[in-house]
Image (cartoon, helix red, strand yellow):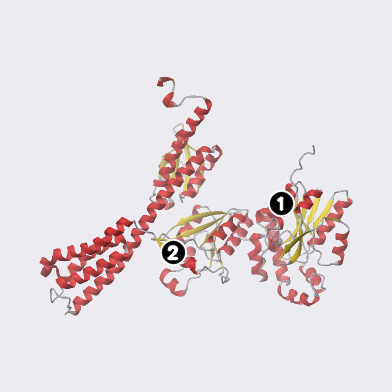
Amino acid sequence: MTPARARGRLRIVLGAAPGAGKTYAMLAEGQRLAAEGADVVVAYATTHHRRRTDELLGSLQQVPLKHVAYRGTSFDELDTDAVIARRPEIALVDEFAHTNVPGAFHVKRWQDVEEIRDAGIDVITTMNVQHIDSLNAAVAAVTGVAQHETVPDTVVAAADAVELIDVDPAALRQRVASSDVFEADMAQAALGVYFTTEHLAALRGLALDWLDAHDLPHESVGADATAGPVPPGGGGRVVAALTGSPEGESVLRRAAQLAAGDGGEFIGVHATTPSGSAEPEPVWLEGQRRLLVELGGRYVEIAADDVATAVVEFAVAEGAGQLVLGATRRSRLQELFHGSVINRAIRHAGTVEVHVVPARHATAAARPTARGRAGRRRVPLPLRRRQVSWAFALAAPAVVTVGLSPFHTSIGLAGALFCTLVAVVGAAALGGLLPAGLATIVGFVLADFFYAPPLHSLRIDRLIDLIALVAFAVVSVIVGGLVDVLARQGLRSARAQSAAENLARVVADVVVGTPEALGELAATVRRAFDLTAVSVLSRQGTGWRVDAEAGRRAPQTPEEATRALELPDHRVLAVLAVGGGPLDTRPLDAFVAELRHAGERHQLDALRRSGGTSPQTGDDAG
C-alpha cells in the first residue's frame, strides 16, 4: 500500500504589476525542475500569446483543461480532479487569484490549489501584489484602478516561499511601450494611467513591506529598483472602528495593512448607541465581519452613548497603538447638533495614532433598501401593561384636576397643570407615547374647564392662560416621548441582561468542559464583559500569584480590583472596570457562579464514569 503523501508545498511567484514576467518565471522554473528529473506538469497557464512564453509552455507536459459551460459559452478552467488523478510532483498553476466561472467546483482558484496541495502535490503559482487582500485598497488608491479578485492574506502568508519579480520601473515601462504586455493601441493609455514610474515604485514598495512584515522566505529576481518602500505606519495592535457604513471595508483593509506592517493583531469594533428601539443591523456589517475573519482579525461589539470616546477607550484597553476610522457621512447640520465623531476621537486619543480613511460614494448595489431603512421598530410593551395605560390616561388626569378643583384659587392654572404632568409621565411609563398623548388632551381640557377663567367653560379669555395651556401640551409631549424611550430601553436592557446572563452560563460550561480553554479565561472574560483588565489569582503563602492576566495594568491582588470573585479550585478572578468606575456585575456573577456549578457537575460526571462516589454519597452516606 502506497503511504499517504505529506501536504504539498506552495511557492508563489509575485509580481509588483502586470507584465513583470510572472508566468514566464513560473514556466522557466518548471522547465529547470523537469530537466533535473522532477515530474512537472502545467495545470493552467495564460501566455497572452507572447512568443517566448509560448515556447516555454510547449516544452512542458500539460494537463487538459476542463470546459465549463456558462450562458451559452464554454470556458476553460483548471481541472483539479485531473491534476490530482495525474499525481505529479509539481503542478504549475497560473493566476492564483482567478475567480472561476459559475459551475466550477470552487469559487476561487486558490481554493483549487489548496485541494491539489491536500493531495500531496507541490504547487508553483503566480499573482500580483494588488491581489493580496489587505493591499487591495492601497493599490487602488495609488493607481486609481480597483481590483476585485483577491486572495486572503492568511493564504498568501502560509506559502512556503515567495519569489518577487522585482523589475525596474523604467524597464517595465519600456516593455509596455514595446507592446510586449498590451496590444499597441492600449500600451500608451496604460503608460499614462497605471504604469507610471511613481505607481510602479509604490507598488514595489507595498510588496516589499508586506513580505517583510510577514517574515516570508522570499527571493527577489532582478532587484535593481532604487525607490524606497512605502512606510506602513507603526503601533503594534490596530483597532478598526466599524459603523456599518460602506467605508468599513476600506477601514478594515487599511487596519490589516497597518497591523501586518508591525506584525501585530488587528480588531474590528462596532459601537452601538443604546436606544428604546430594536434597530436592524447595518446592511454592510455582516459582509464586513466576514472580511474581518478573512483578513485574520477578530470582531468586538460595544455599546456606549459617546461612540468616539468608547472606541478610543477600547483601543487603549486593548493596548492598541493605532486606530482607523472612516470619514464621516454626516451632513454639516448633523455635525452642528451632534458634533464630529472623528474630532472627538482625535481629542481623546492621547498616544493612540488615529488614521482616517476617506469616504467613498456607495454604489447603487450597496445602498440600503427601503425595507432596510424601514426595519427599525420600537421594543413592544406587554399587552396587559398597554391596556392598563389607556385606562390610566383617562382616569389619572381627571382625578388630579377634579381633586384639586376646590383649591383652584390658591394653586391656580399653573399649579394644576404641573400636577397633571405627573399623570402624563405615568401614562407614558406604562404605555408609551400614545397614552401620554391621550393624558395630555384630557388634562388640557379639564384644566381649562376647572382652572381657566371663566370657570366651568372651555373658553380662554386671558392670553397668559392660553400660553400656559399650550406650554403644558408641548412639555407633556416632549416628556412623554422621553419617558416612552426610557421605558422601552429599560425593557430592552432587561432582556439583553437576561440573554447575557444565560450566555454567560453557556460559556462557563464550555470553559469548564474544555481544560485547555482555562488558560484563556482572563482574556475571554475581559473581552466578553468589556473590562480594562482581568487576572486569575491564587494564594501563594501570604501573598498572591498571577496565574493568567489580560489587559493593561491587570490587578496583582484582589484589593487592586474593582471586583474579586472566587473561582473553582480556590482561585480568584480579579476584574478592573473601565476607568476604575462602577461595574454591573450581574452577568459576571452569573458567569462565575456557573463556573463553580459546571465544575461541580464535571467532577460528579468524572466520579460516575470512574465508578467512584460523590461527596454526598460517599462511605459515610450509608
Q: Is residue 496 left or right of residue 215?
A: left
Task: List x then y, in percent, for residue 172.
Answer: 78, 68
The structure residue drawn at horizontal position 72% and vertical position 54%, both measured from the top left corner, is: 112
For the point 44% across and 32% down, the residue is 542
Specify which label sits upstream in the sequence, 1 or 2.
1
Q: Label 1 is placed on what type of residue?
A: Glu
Picture coordinates of residue 483 (x, y %)?
Answer: 31, 62
Q: In what quadrant of the picture does the C terminus appear?
A: top left
Circle 1: element type: helix
Q: Mark 1 points at which residue?
A: 114
Residue closest to the eye, 515 or 307: 515
Question: Circle 2 — which element?
Answer: loop
Horizontally, residue 177 falls left or right of residue 517, namely right
Q: Nearer the viewer, residue 571 or 234?
A: 571
Kindly indicate the quadrant of the structure image that contains residue 22: bottom right
Disc sitting over residue 376 in the figure: 2
Q: How many residues crowd around disc 1 within 10 Å: few (fewer than 14), some, or many (20 or more)?
A: some
x and y, in percent, of residue 509 in the image: 48, 40
**Residue 464 shown left or right of residue 203 in the figure:** left
From the image, state whether disc 1 or disc 2 is nearer to you. Answer: 2
Viewer-proximal residue among 202 and 299: 299
Amino acid marked by disc 2: Arg
